[in-house]
Amino acid sequence: MQQNNKNVLLHGTRSQGTS
């Protein structure tokens, strides 16, 4: 569960940066 959260966080920051 914690690992999944990290993945989502990484994707979230990347998505916001590209947007």
Image (tube, rainbow, N blue to C red):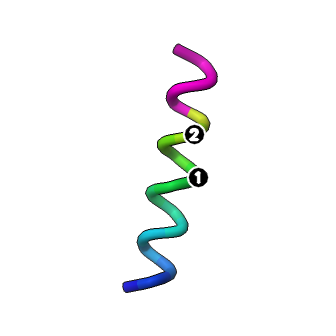
Q: Give the range drawn in magenta.
A: 15-19
Quadrant for residue 8, please give it: bottom left
Using the image, tell me which numbered label, if any, was put on residue 13.
2
Instruction: State the separation of the CA atoms marked 1 and 2.
Output: 5 Å
**Residue 17 shown in magenta:** yes
For badge 2, the amino acid type reads: Thr
Residue furthest out toward the top: 19
Residue furthest out toward the left: 1
x, y percentage for residue 14? 60, 36
**Residue 16 shown in magenta:** yes
For badge 1, the amino acid type reads: Leu
**Residue located at (60% from left, 19% from top):** 18
x, y percentage for residue 13? 57, 39
Q: From the viewer's perspective, is 14 left or right of 11?
A: right
Relative height, residue 1 to residue 7 (above, below): below
Relative height, residue 8 to residue 12 (above, below): below
Relative height, residue 7 to residue 12 (above, below): below
Q: What element carries label 1?
A: helix
Kindly indicate whether the residue at mark 2 contacts the one at mark 1 (C-beta within 8 angstroms). yes
Using the image, tell me which numbered label, if any, was put on residue 2.
none
x, y percentage for residue 4? 43, 74
Residue furthest out toward the bottom: 1
- Count of marks placed on residues: 2
**Residue located at (37% from left, 85% from top):** 1
The residue identified by callout 1 is 10
Q: What element carries label 2?
A: helix
Quadrant for residue 17, please give it: top right
Secondary structure predominantly adopted by residues drawn in magenta:
helix
Disc 1 residue crowd, few under 14, some 14–19, many 20+, Cα 10 Å: few
Q: From the viewer's perspective, is 16 left or right of 17?
A: left
Disc 2 residue crowd, few under 14, some 14–19, many 20+, Cα 10 Å: few
**Residue located at (45% from left, 83% from top):** 2
